[in-house]
Image (spheres, rainbow, N blue to C red):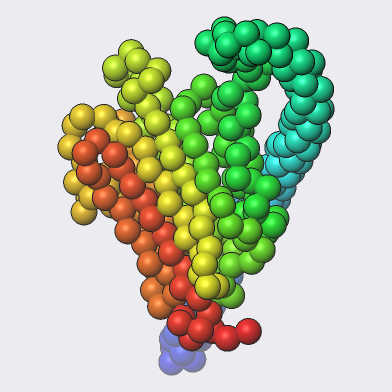
């Protein structure tokens, strides 16, 4: 009996131990499960947060892209509007000058008839004096030179940029000249016309900015001067622009560097952009610029298609 009681007690203890271990195992399993669920929820929350953040960033990027497109579209519209305004002004300018010349021809004939008596009496000095005075009062010489030579440009992009920049120089009150003696209908095919227009625009803007700085430095509006020209012969195209610069020396080997741009030497960034554009046309475009005797000169030549390896 004692042995049976002892055995029963031992089995009871084992049962209690096993039950305790089972309970602990169940508790641990539940705890592990809850911990796993919590970790998964945390990971899910972080993933959701990351996805939301990515969606937000994508939405912001899309918004910024649309804003950039809208700004670019607005700038293009403003540019087109400005060019249209300048072309209308040019057309009005031609019409007005045609009317002025017709009226001047008619009036001049009357003036000449009125001066016949003085001429017949040998009073030539008086005749010349009166004619000079009449010419000066009837014509604004600067206005007559505003678009001089533009009528020979038949390539629309080259004509538009010339009109736009000459109009700017005129409105700034700068002394300038523009020559285009030969008709220009096209440029060599080796160069993108828009790249050429960008180069011309940059160099005109540089010249205008330097001229304004020179006038401010000297206090003399006559100290600045800009001369530009288009030229074409035997299928090539040449553009040259030069302007007076301030007395401080400009190193031509530095002014085309981006980081060289300062208030003192504004030409750096502009010419860096020009250099970047012209780099694409090393076989078909020749560019030179230099400072000499107070003048900065920029010269660009596009070789004929036959010489640059491009045939029509």
Where is residue 92? Give x, y as percent. 79, 32
Judged left or right of residue 291, residue 274 is: right
Where is residue 3? Give x, y as percent. 43, 92
Residue sitting nearer the eye, 29 or 9: 29
Asked if residue 194 is positioned above or below residue 64 in the image, the reply reads below
Count of numbered circles on the image: 0
Residue sitting nearer the eye, 165 or 121: 121
Residue at (59, 75) in percent of width and height: 189
Judged left or right of residue 121, residue 236 is: left
Residue at (68, 47) in percent of width and height: 151
Is residue 268 in sight in this rendering? Answer: no
Q: Quadrant of the C terminus?
A: bottom right
Asked if residue 62 is positioned above or below residue 117 in the image, the reply reads below
Judged left or right of residue 36, residue 297 is: left
Asked if residue 4 is positioned above or below residue 145 in the image, the reply reads below
Where is residue 11? Give x, y as percent. 49, 86
Residue located farthest toward the front when viewing the structure as drawn: 121
Residue at (52, 42) in percent of width and height: 178
Where is residue 35? Give x, y as percent. 54, 64
Residue sitting nearer the eye, 302 or 18: 302
Is residue 149 in sight in this rendering? Answer: yes
Residue sitting nearer the eye, 221 or 190: 221
> Which image quadrant for residue 19?
bottom right
Residue at (64, 13) in percent of width and height: 119
> Which image quadrant for residue 192?
bottom right
Asked if residue 123 is positioned above or below residue 19 in the image, the reply reads above
Judged left or right of residue 272, residue 60 is: right
């Amino acid at each position: 009996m004692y042995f049976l009681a002892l055995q029963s007690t031992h089995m009871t203890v084992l049962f209690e131990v096993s039950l305790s271990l089972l309970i602990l195992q169940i508790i641990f399993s539940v705890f592990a499960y809850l911990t796993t669920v919590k970790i998964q929820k945390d990971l899910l929350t972080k993933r959701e947060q990351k996805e939301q953040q990515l969606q937000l960033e994508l939405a912001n990027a899309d918004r910024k892209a649309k804003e950039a497109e809208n700004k670019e579209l607005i700038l293009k519209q403003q540019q087109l509007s400005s060019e249209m305004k300048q072309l209308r002004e040019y057309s009005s300018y031609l019409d007005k000058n045609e009317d002025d010349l017709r009226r001047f021809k008619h009036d001049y004939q009357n003036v000449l008839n009125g001066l016949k008596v003085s001429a017949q009496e040998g009073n030539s000095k008086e005749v010349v004096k009166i004619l000079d005075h009449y010419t000066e009062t009837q014509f604004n010489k600067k206005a007559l030179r505003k678009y001089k030579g533009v009528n020979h440009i038949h390539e629309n992009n080259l004509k538009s940029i010339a009109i736009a920049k000459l109009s700017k120089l005129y409105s700034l009150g700068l002394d300038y000249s523009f020559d285009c003696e030969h008709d220009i209908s096209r440029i060599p095919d080796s160069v993108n016309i828009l790249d050429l227009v960008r180069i011309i625009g940059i160099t005109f803007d540089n010249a205008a900015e330097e001229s304004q700085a020179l006038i401010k430095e000297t206090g003399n509006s006559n100290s600045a001067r800009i001369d530009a020209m288009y030229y074409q012969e035997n299928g090539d195209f040449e553009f040259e622009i030069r302007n007076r610069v301030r007395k401080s020396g400009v190193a031509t080997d530095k002014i085309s560097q981006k980081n060289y741009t300062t208030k003192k030497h504004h030409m750096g960034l502009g010419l860096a952009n020009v250099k970047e554009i012209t780099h694409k046309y090393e076989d078909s475009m020749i560019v030179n610029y230099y400072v000499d005797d107070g003048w900065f000169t920029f010269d660009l030549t596009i070789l004929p298609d036959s010489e640059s390896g491009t045939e029509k």
